Each structure stands twice: as structure tokens, then as C-alpha cells.
Image (tube, rainbow, N blue to C red):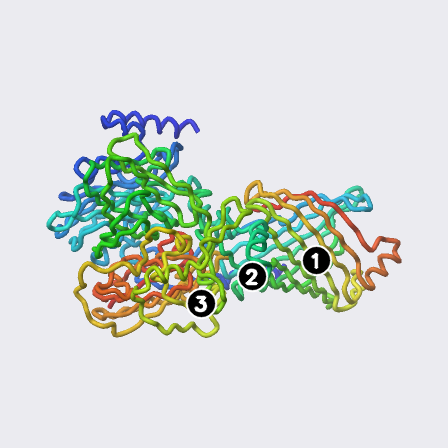
Amino acid sequence: MRTLKIVMSLSLAGMSVPLFAGHAEDHWPEPIKSYRTGQVLFDRLEVTRTDNDEDLIVWDMLAWYGGDRNRIYFKSEGENRSDDGEPAELESAELLASRLIAPFWEIQGGLGTRGSIASGAERENYLVFSLFGMAPYRFEMDNSLTVNEDGDIAVNIEAEYDIRLSQLSYLQPRLEMGAALTDAEEYDRPSGFNNVRMGLRYRYELSRELAPYIGVYWSRALGDKADRVRDQGGDESEIGVVVGVRMWF
Amino acid sequence: MEKPIAEGRRRFIKSAIGTASALALAKIAPAWAYPMGRSYGEVIKADNPVDLHIRRENLNIGGRIGRPITINGNMPGPLIRLKEGQRARLNVTNALDEDTSIHWHGIILPENMDGVPGVSFPGIKPGETFHYEYDVQQSGTYWYHSHSGLQEQLGHLGPLVIDPGDGDIGSDREHVIILSDWTFEDPYEVFRNLTVAEGYYNYQQRTLGDTLADIRSQGLAKTWEERSMWNRMRMSARDLLDVTGSTYTYLMNGRDNATNWTALYKPGEKIRLRIINGSAMSFFDFRIPGLEMTVVSADGQPVKPVTVDEFRIGVAETYDVIVTPKGDRPYTLFAESLDRSGYVRGTLSTELGQEAIVPELRSVPERGMAAMGMSHEMSGMDMESSGRDKSGMKGHHGMHDSYDENMNRKPQQPSAPDLGIEHAPGGHGPGAAMIARNPVSRLNEPGVGLEGVSHRVLVYGDLVGAHPWPDEREPERDIELHLTGNMERYMWSFDGVKFTEVDGPVQFHHGERLRLIMVNDTMMDHPIHLHGMWMELENGQYPRPRKHTISLKPSEVVSLQISADAPGSWAFHCHLLYHMKAGMFRVVNVS
């Protein structure tokens, strides 16, 4: 909790200190005031049906608040398998301080946790650094590196691209890859590439803020991770169809 | 919901009693904009002190009840008519529940009368009255508006006309036309949408269909070259206006297209139209199909007559044109937004109730290589170019090579001086998504979407001052400012630093003659306004035209001569309201 406070205060300290650029006398207002705003974005909020006849609810959201250079982010991804009687699984829940370092890129750092959402569950806590923004050719990217309490290092890459079909509809290919730089036995992440997931979604904007979509994805475990999944009698690859909504407010 | 309707009805009845005119039945346009022209219109003649009351109230705007800021019950506010040589006395009473102000746009006056809260005065508190008083030293067409927050977007604006000392307006009749953009959304919501969701109001983006059409018509290689250039830069060739007809109702003297503002004329008359762009965010292309217009004044200052069929008017600019209608037919006064997302029309006719054919909106233009600051030799591609058919699939490319066309059209046009432009090492930081690699003078280009038109379009290069200005000294010093922005985050600034990050004013030395060089390092057009002093545009003409607001095209460089003769602090900013709000604002200090 203390680390969290430090992150908060550091990021707030970076936010604009109004400097005096006018002529105004002390009691006069600033002609142009600095402003902050924020947004809550559910990039994916979807129901999935896998080829193993499993039903999942999946979310991928972020929220931010701040000015145009310094912001605070909260990001979370996770899923809940219905009928398994277990609480939802947090893939990540992260609180980050963010700074714009180039016109299209933010560097972000903070704390995260993953694991079962159940109270009292043993979760994996970690430090996270992200390079977040838009690559040339308009690829939306979120690349992050995490280090947990045991020093295990993992890398995650997410890329999305919007192909505009009309003024209101889009086709969105999506790629996600996970890799571990060190063996994290406890968390089932052997060193090397762990998984890849590709998706394709068709989205229609009812408004800029609310866009339902349908889509498909294919995911596969890789390398040692795939061996492990097979040893446990699991299926190393999975195909699913999704119905969901992208929304922000 | 009940209340606004009831209030609207009361207003309706009240005004129907107030005026006998059939046109006044719906209280829509302000009284001065009734179409009888100068001799009959209700205007505030400022022989005596003028009282202006600022309030927020329900008003019928294009058939729907909105809640604008009104001035003496009107939106836009009353036409204030001053006379050169008089002392203006204007009392502004604030009946809002927040601070307000009035800035007299383009008027030369003392620093403390300029009306910019935080720069020239503290602003006008709720319930307070501020007394503006200044000597009127000029004549022409100007306007006034709030300089507080986003009040301008709520209609806190109006026309200001100053008659010359001898009273001669150079025509038989005149009409004032103030263009504005109204939204039923909260302006702060508009600003937030622009900030959090790039392209929120742009429903004219390129689609997959456009790309396929390009491949069919110009081949894969060229399409790839074009698309990859834009996509590598993460910019859009259709990024024309930030706020569009998708939320705006464009107004002419407070009336929308259906309520058709009408100006009357008598056959054979010479009519002066005083056109003011009082909108928050919209560039307009103005034309009167079937009628040529002779531009006689720009930003209130006389220019040598130049006859055109169309002109682009940037936000805050004014043009006076003389027209002589043939016969007694009606003509459409047509103002089309730069991005072709909408228009507003009025009618010029001999009696009320007439209308002429309203032109179709032209196809959505696209920015070309010139917008990126690349000469066309470098890229082997067109300059700003090429309309695309609205239907999307069939691109027509009849407007290509328009750059050469323009050059042929005005081969003898003098050009602006060649200026060596240097960018700060390492660019302008994360607030600037682009740097014009090869900024050029574009004063002889009509602007995006107007390159290929077959009729005469005004360019800045056409403007010649009617007479020389008093200060003929050569500039002693250059000041260079770059217009910078990052559309993705809605960051707008000068030299990559927004107002709240700047640690001091831009310093002019009192009495000096200086040259202000501006470079547009963005993909948008920006109307830049200097308060308190004129800017003489170095467009290669003599006498130079004098402007209070100068529009820069993407990757354009312009130079202006300024006499720093007005001591004090003055605002200097982009007149696109939300760009100013985002930080594209500086204070110029003259001392």
C-alpha cells in the first residue's frame, strides 16, 4: 500500500505546475487554465464460446486520469469461466504512472497483481513497465515487462489495428504474445515463448462511445508451456467465437 | 422538458407583438439581421453609451430550443455601429453565473480595454458591469466576442461595424453576414471528446473502399506510396476540421438553412456585404452562384478591389465584398464548411420568401504531400489535391496536378520573401507530432479543396493594401514561432509548449518594427490572431495588406511586419476555440 502511495504522489508531482506566462496581476485569473480529464475504456467486454464448449466472460479495460503529458492508469484484464465454480481469474490488474515521451508513446510504470480474484487467494504481485501508444502504420500497442517478487521476468505484447470499413464499422485484427525470460515454476511460466493469441473482430459503432462486435480468436500454448499443457491432459490450442462490446465513458 | 417549450412560446408571442414584420414571427435571427438593409435595420448606434446584457437563456435555434448565451436577448448579439473618430462607451453587464468578458476583435485600443481576462483585465464577475471606453481610430467590419472559457461556442459574439469619418460606405446598401457554428452539446463535452477520442466528430475518414478505389484508378504502387506515407506518420489526409457538421448547425445571422436568412436588394443597386466568420472552429468557403464578388476590404482594412467568385474565410477573419446583382432574381449566399461536412445558406433577393438553387456540397477533399511540408518534386506527387466522391467507391481524380494549374493561373504573382527556417534541434517534443520538413510560402494557393475549381478563388497573394501604412521602416529584428500540435492527444501549442508550460511572454520592444515569422508544423489550418497591433502580411505586394488574423495552411511559412506601437500585454493565439483552450496561446508584452 505504501508503494502505491508513492507511485500516486510521484505521478501527481509531475502534473503541471502552473507557470506564469501572462502579465496578470495576482488576483487575475489565468487566461488559459491547465486541464485534466479522464476516461474509462472497455476495449473488450465479451462472452466467449470455445471449441471445448466452455463459456467465458472476458474483460480488457483501462481507465486514466490526467493532463496531456502525465496520467495515471488503471488497467485490468481477466476472465471468468462459467460453470467451473471458481471465482474470476485476474490476468492483470495494474496501477501505473504514465508519461508522454514521444508524440505517440507513453512510458508507464507501476504495480500489478494477477491470480484468482477470490479473497485470501495467493496472488502474484509484480512491478510493471509498459511502452504504450501507437506504432507507425497506426498499430495500437501495449508492450509490458513485469518482474514479480521472486524476480521472474515476463514480457507481454499486445497489438491492435483498426481497418475502417465505413464511417461506423471496423475490422480489427489483434495479436497478443506472452513470453518469460526466466523460469517461473510457481506460476506455470517456463522460460521462452508461452502463448500466442490472434483475434479478428468486426465492430459497429452505435455511437463513438458504444460499439458492439462479433469475432473469432485462436490461441495456442508454445514451447515448454505447450508440453506442460499436454502433460496435464489439456488442449494446447483453442478456438473461440466472441460477442462483445467496446465502450467508453 | 416542459419548461423550455413554454419559454420559447412566450418569447415567440412577445416578439410577434414587438414587430409588425412577418419575418419576426419566429424569434430566430437578431433584429439587426432582418433583411431590409442598412436604412431599416435595428442596430445599436453608439452615439450614446451602449448597454449590453449578457445572459444564458433558451432560444429557438434552427427549430430546436437551445440554451445559448445571448447579448440583449439575441444570439448572435446586436450589431454595434460606431463611427471613426468617436469615443466608444460600452457598458457590459454580466447576468451569467460565471465570469465573462467582451473582446473587440481587430480594434486598436488601450491594453486595459481589450477584454482578455488575465491579460488585460480581471474579467467581469457575475452581476457586475464593466465600462469599456476607447477612441475609435479606424473604420471597417469587425466583431466582438467573449474571451472567457468556451463562451464563444455558446454564441457570445456579435458584429461590430465602424463607419468611416466621411460616412461613405462605397455602395447603395449594405448587409452584415456573421457566420457561426452552433452545437446543442456542452462545449466542455466537445472539448473532452476531442481530447479522449481522436477524430470523434470526423465522419468522413478514409475507408478500405477508398483505398481499393485508389488501387483501381492509380495502381497499387502509387496507392501504397501514399497510404504508407500517411500511416507511417500516423496522420489522416482527411483531418480537415476537428469539429464538423456532425454536431454543428451552421448559422448565418443566427438562422439555419431552413429559416433561410434573406437580404433584400433593389435591381441595379451596388451592395456591400460585410462577411464575418464568427464561428468557434469552422473555416467556410463563401460564394454566391451567378454573382461575382469584388473584395474591397480584408479584416476591416481596405484593399485594392479584386474580383473573385469564391473566397475562404478563416475563423475570426472578415471580408467586405461589393456585388451588383443582375436583373431581379434571387441568389443563394452559400457558406460551405472547409471539410464539406455542412453548409449554411441565405438568400439575396428583391422580396422576402424567394429562394434560389442551393448548390450541392462538394466532395470531401484530401490533404496532399504539401501538407506534410514536402515539395512535389521530392515526392513526385500532387500538392493538396483531389476530391473524392461522396459515394466513396468511385474516386475521381480530375483535380490532380492542380498545383501546376494554380501556378499557370497566376504566373506573374509576386511571391513572399524566402526565409531560412530552422527547427529546434530534436524537434518540438512530444507536443508536436510533425515537423514541416520543407515549409514553403503557400500564399498563392487557395487551400485544400479549392485547388481545382474552375472559377476565381481569392488567395492571400491577391490582397494589396489600398494605401501604404504609416510605418515604413524595415524590420529590425525577426521573431520566429512554430505552430505545433499532436492531434492524437489534442495538444496544441507554439514551439511545442502550451501556454500553461511557458515561463514568460513573447517580448516586443516598444517602438520597434519587427518581422514575425510563423511556421505551421501541423496538418491543420490555423487562424492566428494578434491583439492590439496590426500585422502586415508580406505577400510580395505593395502596399502590404493589413490583418488582425492570419490563416496558415499546413506546412506553410508566413512573415508579417509589425509596428510594436501598443504598450502593454496582448493575447496572441490560434482562433480555433478548442486549440486556444488546449494551450495554443501566448501573451505578447510590448515594453
Q: Earlier in the sequence, mark 3 or mark 2?
A: 2
Q: Are marks 3 and 2 on the same chain?
A: yes
Q: Secondary structure at mark 2?
A: helix
Relative to B387, B96 lies left or right: left
Q: Are marks 3 and 1 on the same chain?
A: no
Relative to B333, B171 lies left or right: left
**Residue hosting label 3:** B375
Amino acid found under the numbered disc labelled 2? Lys
Q: Residue at x 40, y 50 (%)?
A: B338
**Residue hosting label 1:** A176
**Residue hosting label 2:** B222
- Image coords of residue B146 (percent x, y): 31, 48
Amino acid found under the numbered disc labelled 3? Ser
Q: Is residue A234 visible?
A: yes
| Number of dots carrying numbers | 3
Quadrant where the N terminus of chain B is found in the figure: top left
The correct choice, above or below, for B397 with respect to B375 in the image is above
Chain label for disc 2? B
Q: Residue at x 36, y 65 (%)?
A: B441
- Image coords of residue B407 (percent x, y): 36, 62
Q: Is residue A25 visible?
A: no
Chain label for disc 1? A
Determine whether label 2 and label 1 are within 8 Å by CB.
no
Determine whether label 3 and label 2 are within 8 Å by CB.
no
Q: Residue at x 33, y 47 (%)?
A: B286
The correct choice, above or below, for B568 with respect to A37 in the image is below
Determine whether label 3 and label 1 are within 8 Å by CB.
no
